[in-house]
Image: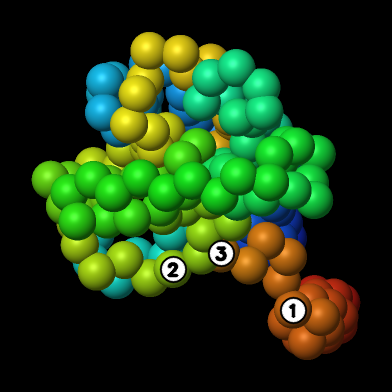
Amino acid sequence: MNLVKIFLVGVATFILGGLNAHATVVDVFALANSSTGGSGAVTGINVNIGDHLVMNTDVNDCWSAGPSPRVSNADGLIGSGGFCQPTSAFSLHTQDGVTAAFGSLMAKIGAGNFFFVGTAFDQITTTAGALSLYYWDSDFANNSGSVAVSINLNPTQSVPEPGVLGLLGFGLLGLSFFRRKI
């Protein structure tokens, strides 16, 4: 394999390598993963201090804290106005010193404290350990449904900058001239 072919394989690997980044998707169940009567949904993700953690759920992905109108998305029972919030009730639950709306998507890292995730979370972590996800509620017996959570740990830029691609193009052009002179 000559030098140009080796270089081209390296360039292709560099460009396509960023496109292989993908999220981990975890289903969190309102009953089984309740903060008061279940156990956290295991994500299989271990977080370190300083990691960039991004979690998202579809705002139209609903779960329930009981008979209607206690249906919400991962932001919890925060009032009317959305597909998943047909109620005007604003209900809060406090557990382990943390207060959030019933039906909120919550998380823990290791044995740390609960923290609010909701439908969109994007933070640098301050603790280390295994990431687990919960449905926030005080009476888990009548919970139903689930939400799918997309998790990205230390997401990277998926497409190289145009300037980088330009430099690679000039490098290829230079190599083609170099090849012809030999």
Q: Quadrant of the C terminus?
A: bottom right
Alpha carbon distance from label 2 to label 3: 14 Å
Q: Residue at x 50, y 37 (%)?
A: 103
Labelled disc at residue 93: none
Q: Residue furthest front?
A: 89
Which amino acid type is marked by label 3? Thr
Q: Where 172 falls versus 12 (above or below)?
A: below
Viewer-closest of 1 and 72: 72
Which residue, given by chain and number where applicable, does mark 3 sit on?
A: 156
| Horizontal side, residue 93 vs residue 79: left or right | left
Residue 59 is situated, as x and y percent measured from the top left of the image, at 72, 44
User: Count the marks: how many?
Assistant: 3
Alpha carbon distance from label 1 to label 3: 12 Å
Which residue, given by chain and number where applicable, does mark 1 sit on?
A: 161
| Horizontal side, residue 88 vs residue 170: left or right | left
Query: Can residue 3 be seen in the rendering of this structure?
Result: no
Q: Residues within 10 Å of mark 2 (few under 14, many from 20)?
A: few
Q: Residues within 10 Å of mark 1 (few under 14, many from 20)?
A: few
Query: Can residue 110 be seen in the rendering of this structure?
Result: yes
Residue 101 is situated, as x and y percent measured from the top left of the image, at 47, 48
Residue 108 is situated, as x and y percent measured from the top left of the image, at 27, 46
Viewer-closest of 46 and 76: 76
Q: Residue at x 39, y 38 (%)?
A: 136
Between circles 2 and 3, the one closer to the viewer is: 2
Q: Residues within 10 Å of mark 3 (few under 14, many from 20)?
A: few
Between circles 2 and 1, the one closer to the viewer is: 2
Which residue, given by chain and number where applicable, does mark 2 sit on?
A: 123
